[in-house]
Every structure is written in C-alpha cells, then in structure tokens.
C-alpha cells in the first residue's frame, strides 16, 4: 500500500487502470492523504478498516474490489471467494452488496470480464454522482432562506460521490445563495460529524457548528432547528431505515418537536428483499472505539463497552425519503422496485 499527498480538488474515490485511489478518511481533518489500493484484498481491507466509509463510497470501493478480483483471478471458485471476502468487510451498507452483485453479474459472462467489471464499477460511481445532484435539487426545495439544519454522521462528498446524500440539499441550497446554518452532530464514537462533516462544510464555506450528540434535543426545544437531513445505509421494503447509531433518537425528537425529518439516499440503498428494519444486519464494532480515543483509555478499563455502529429508525418517524426519483412517503418506498 503506497501513500501520497493530495494537492487537487478532491473526490473520495477514483481509479486509474487497476489501482483505486482514496482519501484516507481516518487521517481527516488533520491530514489529507491519498492511499493507493492495488489489489482486491487491499481495497476490501480499506473498507473493513474504515479508511473509506459511507454507504455510497463503500459501494463504489466494493465494485472496484470486485473488478480487481476479475483482474487477479480467472476461475469461478476464486472469484466467488473474493466476492464473499469483500462482502464480509462491512455488513450493513446495502450499496456494498448492490455493487458486488452488479459487477459480478455483468462481468462473469462478458467477452472481456475484467474490462466489463471495471466499466461497471465506473458506472456505479458516475450514477452516484448524478443521483447525488438530483437528490440535492429535490432536497433544496425543502430548505428556506434562513433555515437551521441538523445532520448526523457524515453523508457528504466523502460518503457518496458528487455532493453526498444528506449534505446534497445543503450544498445545493448554499449554491442557490440561501442563508443556512448547519448543526453537525459529533457522532460518537468515531466522530464522523466532528471530523469529517465539519471539514467538508468548512471546505465549502458553509456556516456550521459541531454539537455533541446529546445536544440536538436541547436545540430542537429552543426552535433552533428547522429541518433534519440524514443519510441511510440500508432502507427496508417497509420504509424503515438503518443509519449511524443515534439517528433513531434524532427522529423521535424531531417528531416530538414537529420538525421535518428527511432521509436522503439513492435507490441503490434500498433492500427490496428486506421486509422491515429488524431484519437489517447491524454491525457491532470493537469496544475499543468506545473506551479509547486515539489509543488512550478514556473509560474504566475493567468495564465492557457495547458498540453497535447503526440503528433502525422506524418508518413512522420519517417525514420523507428523498431519492433520485423524488420525495417519497416511507411507506411508499416499495413502489420504486
Ligand atoms: O460507519 P460509517 O461511517 O460508514 O457510517 C456512515 C453513515 O451512517 C452514513 O450516514 C450513511 O452511510 C449514509 S451516507 C451515504
């Protein structure tokens, strides 16, 4: 694995030939470093170790890892093994499975499987980019001049190509000249809000503040939040949504305070085979992420810690789901099949 410095206008992931390039998100906001991933195993490990993250970027990387596998292996058994290895990297983001299946199915019977695999993975990246802009346009219609917006985790340019998902309406509203302010939940334990969303917003010149995860209700009650946008890692057939741990509480608080709560995600995040939220696999991560900060213990060493990475927000708490096809009631999401 080679590392370089970044000195260009950035995107989260791109490729040249068989090499995948990513911004190492574990180094942000302090350092911007590009990492080169030269094999299927390197790319799958980068997903697993969260050098890249966010459902869309995970999906694109998984598509490229599958394409790298087509370049590295030729027999069906090895390809199947590689596919399972990529799919074991992170269990919740539906885009990962969407990408491995799509690349695998399109390439396996193609005349030139390797070429078709990379072209299909490129296509997934370009579709995300296009869909992100469209979702931004739909979502920006909901943002009035002077609005204060809450977001949770990072669902911006680093999480999905283009403008991201939840942040796409924010970028669009800003570009339209609307005066907006963003509250970015810090998002314990990995701090995607404090470290990544805040970095992205600052790059774009969008006024914002980081708040601790427990402060959202305080600001809602004070009528300081007008609308909430979050992304999604997987959406079930009935409109239940898996997203970063803490999303559910924000949705319940929004309903209690009559604040519109929108989920923004492309159709590739919908798992039509999953009937409802309880069937979505939730990733359980290491207790060290809760007990340590940059390798320093910050909790009682003798206590165990639990660390679910995602939670489920039942459809009844969601005002609308914004996809590239429009703004939908959660209970209607199945009709997009
Ligand atoms: O664990 P992460 O950082 O990959 O989780 C990311 C999120 O939960 C995002 O909100 C989600 O992927 C939507 S953005 C495409």
Image (cartoon, grey):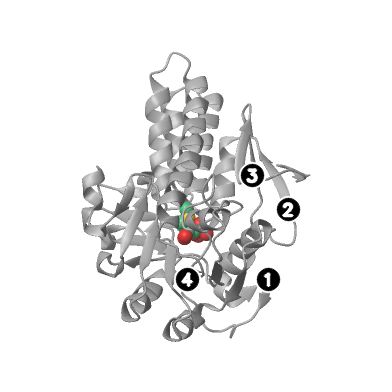
Q: CA distance from mark 4 to mark 1?
A: 16 Å
Relative to the observer, which residue lies in front, 147 or 24? 147
Quadrant in the picture for residue 290: bottom right
Q: Is residue 230 left or right of residue 252?
A: right
Q: Is mark 3 within 8 Å of ligand 1?
A: no
Does the rendering let one see residue 304?
no
x and y percentages locating residue 51 in the rendered image = 61, 52
At numbered mark 3, what does the secondary structure look like: helix, strand or loop? Answer: strand
x and y percentages locating residue 109 in the rendered image = 38, 19
Graded by Cα atoms within 10 Å as few (under 14), some (14 to 19) or many (20 or more), the crowding at tag 4 reads some
Residue drawn at x 74%, y 43% is 8
Q: Give the mark, 4 or 1, whose residue is nearer the N terminus.
A: 1
Q: Is mark 2 within 8 Å of ligand 1?
A: no
Q: CA distance from mark 3 to mark 2?
A: 10 Å
Does the rendering let one see residue 160?
yes
Residue at which label 1 appears: 295
Q: CA distance from mark 4 to mark 2?
A: 27 Å
Residue at which label 3 appears: 22
Q: Which label was assigned to residue 32?
A: 2
Q: Give the mark, 1 or 2, whose residue is nearer the N terminus.
A: 2
Relative to the observer, which residue lies in front, 143 or 331? 143
The vertical placement of 262 against 15, above or below, is: below
Q: Give the mark, 3 or 4, whose residue is nearer the N terminus.
A: 3
Q: Give the mark, 1 or 3, whose residue is nearer the N terminus.
A: 3
Q: CA distance from mark 1 to mark 3?
A: 24 Å
Q: Which label was assigned to residue 307?
A: 4
Residue drawn at x 43%, y 61% is 283
């Amino acid at each position: 694995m080679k590392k370089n410095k970044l000195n260009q206008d950035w995107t989260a992931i791109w490729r040249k030939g068989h090499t995948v390039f990513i911004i190492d998100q574990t180094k942000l906001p302090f350092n911007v470093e590009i990492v080169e991933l030269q094999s299927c195993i390197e790319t799958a490990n980068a997903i697993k170790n969260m050098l890249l993250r966010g459902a869309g970027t995970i999906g694109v990387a998984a598509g490229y890892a599958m394409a790298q596998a087509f370049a590295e292996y030729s027999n069906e058994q090895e390809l199947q093994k590689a596919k399972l290895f990529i799919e074991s990297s992170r269990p919740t983001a539906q885009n990962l499975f969407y990408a491995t299946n799509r690349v695998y199915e399109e390439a396996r019977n193609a005349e030139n499987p390797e070429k078709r695999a990379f072209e299909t993975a490129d296509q997934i990246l370009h579709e995300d980019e296009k869909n992100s802009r469209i979702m931004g346009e739909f979502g920006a219609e909901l943002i009035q001049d002077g609005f204060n917006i809450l977001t949770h985790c990072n669902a911006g340019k680093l999480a999905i190509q283009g403008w991201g998902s939840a942040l796409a309406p924010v970028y669009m509203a800003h570009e339209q000249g609307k005066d907006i302010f963003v509250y970015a939940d810090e998002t314990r334990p990995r701090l995607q809000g404090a470290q990544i969303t805040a970095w992205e917003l600052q790059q774009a010149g969008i006024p914002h503040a980081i708040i601790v995860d427990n402060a959202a209700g305080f600001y809602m009650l004070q009528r300081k939040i007008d609308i909430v946008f979050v992304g999604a890692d997987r959406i079930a057939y009935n409109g239940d949504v898996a997203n970063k741990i803490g999303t559910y509480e924000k949705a319940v608080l929004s309903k209690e305070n009559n604040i519109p709560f929108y989920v923004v995600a492309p159709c590739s995040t919908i798992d039509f085979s999953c009937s409802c939220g309880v069937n979505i696999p939730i990733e359980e991560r290491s207790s060290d992420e809760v007990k340590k900060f940059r390798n320093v213990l910050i909790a009682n060493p003798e206590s165990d810690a639990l660390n679910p990475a995602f939670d489920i927000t039942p459809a009844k708490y969601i005002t609308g789901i914004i996809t590239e096809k429009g703004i939908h009631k959660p209970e209607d999401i199945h009709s997009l099949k």
